[in-house]
Amino acid sequence: MVYFNGFVLKGEEQFFSEEIVDTEQSVVGFSYGAQKAFEYALQSQKRIDRLILISPAFFQNHKKSFIQRQLRAFKEDEEVYKKTFLENVVYPSNLSLEAFVSQGSYEELEALLSYVWEEGKFQELINRGVKVEVFMGGSDKIVNAQKSFDFFSKLVPVYLYKESGHLLR
């Protein structure tokens, strides 16, 4: 399995043992890592049977001013931004992610916020025989769960955990 971590995280895949299918032909990504996993699957020459996108970072429905505010807040105080971000990742649980925190960069945040999911790319993967699945929390405080669900559910199977947040808890 190839796994891609979320923004400012490492090792968080252990939280997704129920969603992950751990085979050599599986690609999995969480949040920002879902974007990277998606692009990896598109570019890979290796056989990929399953692409699992867990709480994919979906911000294409936001205004540019929202993205600019996020980037400005990160620049002004990176530690406060990360702390608030991680609190929103674990909501509604009170789980500590302290052991899973890694360095995140302004460039990664900018890539995460400006990424555009394209319907045609999904069709390309499906045509190649890749089974794409999306897992989302209905109480997500990172992305707008309804808009994310509306977008992804018209393309691939989406499993919505209504009472869960970004971390599917």
Image (cartoon, helix red, strand yellow):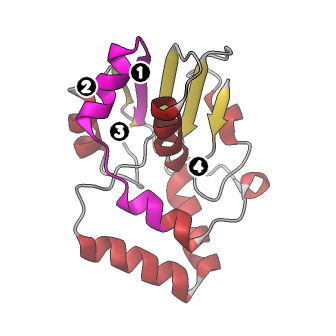
Is residue 32 one of those drawn in magenta? no
Residue linked to disc 1: 132
Assess disc 3: are there few (<14), some (14-19) or many (≥20) residues with their C-alpha within 10 Å of its C-alpha. Answer: many
Tell me where the magenta segment starts and ends, as one range: 110-136
CA separation in Å, label 2 and label 3: 18 Å
CA separation in Å, label 4 and label 2: 22 Å
Callouts 3 and 1 close, C-beta under 8 Å: no
Can I make out residue 169 in this image? no
Relative placement, left or right, of 93 versus 112 is: right
Residue linked to disc 2: 155
Assess disc 4: are there few (<14), some (14-19) or many (≥20) residues with their C-alpha within 10 Å of its C-alpha. Answer: many
The quadrant in which residue 169 appears is top right
> Could you tell which of marks 3 and 1 lies nearer the N-terminus?
1
Residue linked to disc 3: 138
Callouts 3 and 4 close, C-beta under 8 Å: no
Relative placement, left or right, of 102 versus 113 is: right
Dot 4 lies on which element? loop
Callouts 1 and 2 close, C-beta under 8 Å: yes
Relative placement, left or right, of 27 versus 51 is: right
> Could you tell which of marks 3 and 4 lies nearer the N-terminus?
4
Q: Nearer the viewer, residue 13 or 91?
A: 13
CA separation in Å, label 1 and label 2: 9 Å
Q: Is residue 64 above or below residue 77?
A: above
Q: Amino acid at mark 1?
A: Val
Residue depicted at 36% across the width and 79% down the height: 69
x, y percentage for residue 59? Answer: 32, 56
The quadrant in which residue 133 appears is top left
Residue depicted at 30% across the width and 51% down the height: 144
Residue linked to disc 4: 6
> Could you tell which of marks 4 and 2 lies nearer the N-terminus?
4
> Could you tell which of marks 1 and 2 lies nearer the N-terminus?
1
Relative placement, left or right, of 17 versus 35 is: right
